[in-house]
Image (cartoon, rainbow, N blue to C red):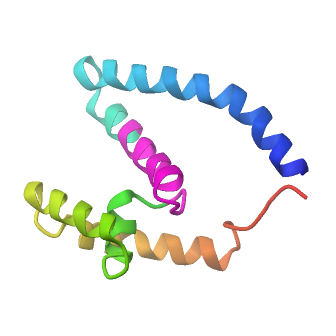
Amino acid sequence: MKERLAGFVLMTAIVPLAVLGYLLLVWVGFFGRTERGRAGVRALDHFVNATLFNGYAWESVSSHAWRERDNRRWARIVIRMTDAFQKDHCRRANKREQPIVDLMLAKGLHQQTIR
């Protein structure tokens, strides 16, 4: 129960900041430095993976799609879409990110933190 309450309190602050961050990301995408925009898009990618696709917060949608390619229809759709822009994008993303996922799981960072 404490974790749910803490999550609610955090989300009341984080959600408005996330909306503001998204609007700033759009601005940076058009007028700002490429590195700042890339970091924002990467963070948004990880957020979408964790919330919409029930993935790990430290993994991109592409990497998660490659891991789930045999089990999930959405993953096959993501792979087909990204292949249209960059061949083997999801496979390469997973190859790059899988060691991070393995480390986070080994350290137990996916487990409950508030008790």
Image: 33 above or below 91 = above
Image: 48 above or below 108 = above
User: Split into 4 quadrants, where in the image is the C terminus?
Assistant: bottom right
Please name the residue shown 54% across and 29% down the image: 18
- Left/right placement of residue 106 relative to residue 99 reads right
Percent position of residue 92, x then y: 25, 70
**What secondary structure prevails in the magenta region?**
helix
Please name the residue shown 32% across and 23% down the image: 26
- Left/right placement of residue 84 relative to residue 26 reads left
- Left/right placement of residue 99 relative to residue 8 reads left
Residue 65, by quadrant, is bottom left
Q: Which residues are magenta?
A: 40-58
- Left/right placement of residue 31 relative to residue 98 reads left
Please name the residue shown 53% across and 62% down the image: 56
Residue 33, by quadrant, is top left
Percent position of residue 16, x then y: 59, 22
Residue 81, by quadrant, is bottom left
